[in-house]
Image (spheres, grey):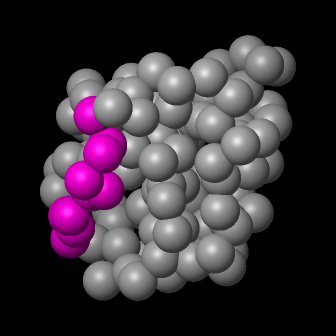
Amino acid sequence: MTYIVTEQCIACKHMDCVSVCPVDCFYEGENMLVIHPDECIDCGVCEPECPADAIKPAMGPEMDIWVEFNAKYARVWPNIIEKGQPPANAKEMEGVADKLATLFSDRPGEGS
């Protein structure tokens, strides 16, 4: 099992998870993070750090789409190893519906 980032990270991108990851398996997009499924060691320390509840264990067929999504963008976005500044409106974006269809950007972030 791996952990993956889901839709709730879009436009929130708090990045508290990056600070606790022992293997630096987070990758940064313009407005969200992803976890490289092949690099994640399944420790789970990132999951409780996410205020938006966007990090989930990749368990069950409903998570397959997010495993593929995380793998795809981890191959093209820069690795991030230090917590950056979340968007100014991150708290307001928590829980917003349909973020993937309306807010997602496939552009890479700055990395660190």
Count of numbered labels shown in the rendering:
0
**Where, quadrant-wise, is the C terminus in this rendering?**
bottom left
Q: Is residue 90 depicted above or below 96 in this figure?
A: below
Q: Residue at x 52, y 45 (%)?
A: 10
For residue 100, say whether it is visible. Answer: yes
Q: Position of residue 67 (x, y in %)?
A: 71, 42
Residue 18, by quadrant, is bottom left
Q: Is residue 39 depicted above or below 97 in this figure?
A: below
Q: Residue at x 51, y 69 (%)?
A: 30
* Majority secondary structure in the magenta region: loop
Looking at the image, which is closer to me, 54 or 19?
54
For residue 67, say whether it is visible. Answer: no
Q: Residue at x 47, y 48 (%)?
A: 11
Residue 6, by quadrant, is top right
Q: Is residue 72 magenta?
A: no
Q: Is residue 107 depicted above or below 94 in this figure?
A: below
Q: Which residues are magenta?
A: 82-91
Looking at the image, which is closer to me, 31 or 102?
102
Q: Position of residue 58 (x, y in %)?
A: 62, 29
Q: Position of residue 13 (x, y in %)?
A: 37, 50
Q: Is residue 56 left or right of residue 112?
A: right
**Where, quadrant-wise, is the N terminus in this rendering?**
top right
Residue 72, by quadrant, is bottom right
